[in-house]
């Protein structure tokens, strides 16, 4: 992969002080490619948008066996520190692993304007997760950790058959993400998720969780645990009924994006009103 998969969508009026931006995080063994349409949609609605490959992903996929969940966290925090200083309103959003990371950042940065968590993955309990996941603790303590991977299921996290076929053809031609889940990577996700669950009460910013009732990777339990544990006064849960894990590409993708637009738009309005009062 090349670094071109990372993307920054910045409006020309940045010099004049565009006030709002969104930092996006992709999913486990994925890449910014899967967030591109979402990012473009947000950009067209007035947000500057940034998305980068996690360590061990993208062009650094050869590092996947040595990267830890702490490396992912340090990477995300560094991006947040560097970018958020330029904006009055800064949001974070992610899918799967990226959703867990967005919540992690909100636990450690109380100046985040809002979080949008899509298909949050704090538990691997979706309908396509193999029973062998229960052997993970044993496998990680042996040499097996370097040789075994959990294969991507045939549905690619998408219920829509036409989209699924398109993704299958695309992944066969273009290197946009891994077609399996290395044990080390799965373990990193679960360790990050455990840490996130311990600190949910530290989240005070508005949070939107969108999750499918038929998520093949992680059940709605993940989203519900988040919303029950955070301290935010503003929190919203949207449950989908005609999608799998990749909600940005499935049957309800337009509804998902418009729901995000409405949620962020309300927060932008509230923040603008606060600023006007201070002036």
Image (tube, helix red, strand yellow):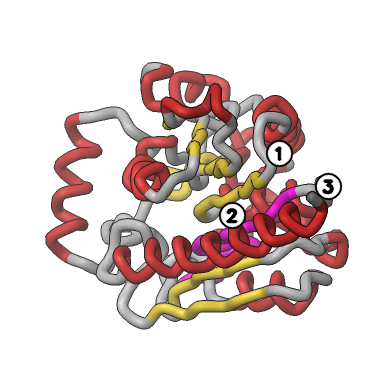
Q: Do tag 1 and tag 2 residues touch (Cβ < 8 Å)? A: no
> Label 2: few (<14), some or many (≥20) within 10 Å?
many
Q: Which residue is mark 3?
A: 108
Secondary structure under badge 3?
A: helix
| 112 or 88, nearer to the observer | 88
- Is label 1 or label 2 in front? 2
Asked whether residue 217 appears in the rendered view, the answer is yes
**Main SS class of the magenta portion in the image:** loop
Residue 197 lies in quadrant:
bottom right
Residue located 55% across and 27% down the image: 16
Secondary structure under badge 2?
A: helix
Q: Mark 1 to mark 3: distance in Å?
A: 15 Å
Residue 146: x and y in percent read: 57, 31
- Is label 2 or label 3 in front? 3
Residue 32: x and y in percent read: 43, 36
Residue 209: x and y in percent read: 57, 69
Left/right of residue 195 with respect to residue 146 in the rendered view: right
Q: Is residue 228 above or below residue 67?
A: below
Q: Mark 1 to mark 2: distance in Å?
A: 14 Å
Q: Do tag 1 and tag 3 residues touch (Cβ < 8 Å)? A: no
Q: Which residue is mark 1?
A: 69
Residue 2: x and y in percent read: 38, 17
Residue located 44% across and 74% down the image: 212
Asked whether residue 122 is drawn in magenta, I would say yes
Residue located 65% across and 25% down the image: 66
Residue located 30% across and 28% down the image: 175
> Label 3: few (<14), some or many (≥20) within 10 Å?
few
Q: Which residue is mark 2?
A: 99
Tell me where the magenta segment starts and ends, as one range: 112-126
Q: Quadrant of the N terminus?
A: top left
**Label 1 vs 3, first from the N-terminus:** 1
**Label 2 vs 3, first from the N-terminus:** 2
């Amino acid at each position: 992969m090349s670094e071109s998969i990372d993307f920054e969508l910045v409006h020309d009026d940045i010099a004049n002080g565009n006030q709002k931006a969104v930092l996006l995080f992709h999913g486990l063994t994925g890449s910014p490619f899967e967030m591109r349409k979402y990012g473009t949609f947000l950009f067209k609605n007035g947000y500057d948008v940034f998305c980068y490959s996690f360590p061990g992903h993208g062009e650094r996929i050869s590092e996947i066996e040595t990267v830890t969940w702490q490396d992912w966290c340090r990477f995300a925090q560094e991006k947040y520190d560097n970018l958020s200083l330029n904006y009055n309103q800064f949001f974070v959003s992610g899918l799967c692993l990226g959703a867990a990371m967005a919540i992690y950042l909100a636990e450690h940065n109380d100046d985040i304007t809002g979080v949008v968590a899509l298909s949050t993955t704090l538990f691997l309990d979706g309908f396509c997760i193999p029973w062998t996941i229960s052997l993970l603790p044993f496998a990680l303590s042996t040499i097996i950790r370097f040789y075994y991977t959990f294969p991507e299921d045939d549905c690619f996290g998408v219920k829509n058959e036409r989209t699924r076929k398109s993704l299958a053809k695309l992944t066969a031609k273009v290197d946009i993400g891994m077609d399996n889940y290395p044990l080390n990577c799965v373990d990193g996700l679960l360790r990050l998720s455990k840490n996130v669950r311990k600190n949910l009460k530290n989240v005070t910013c508005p949070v939107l969780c969108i999750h499918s009732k038929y998520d093949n990777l992680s059940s709605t339990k993940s989203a519900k645990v988040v919303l029950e544990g955070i301290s935010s006064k503003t929190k919203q849960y949207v449950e989908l009924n005609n999608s799998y894990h990749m909600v940005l590409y499935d049957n309800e993708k337009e509804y998902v994006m418009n729901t995000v637009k409405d949620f962020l738009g309300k927060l932008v309005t509230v923040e603008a009103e606060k600023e006007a009062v201070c002036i």
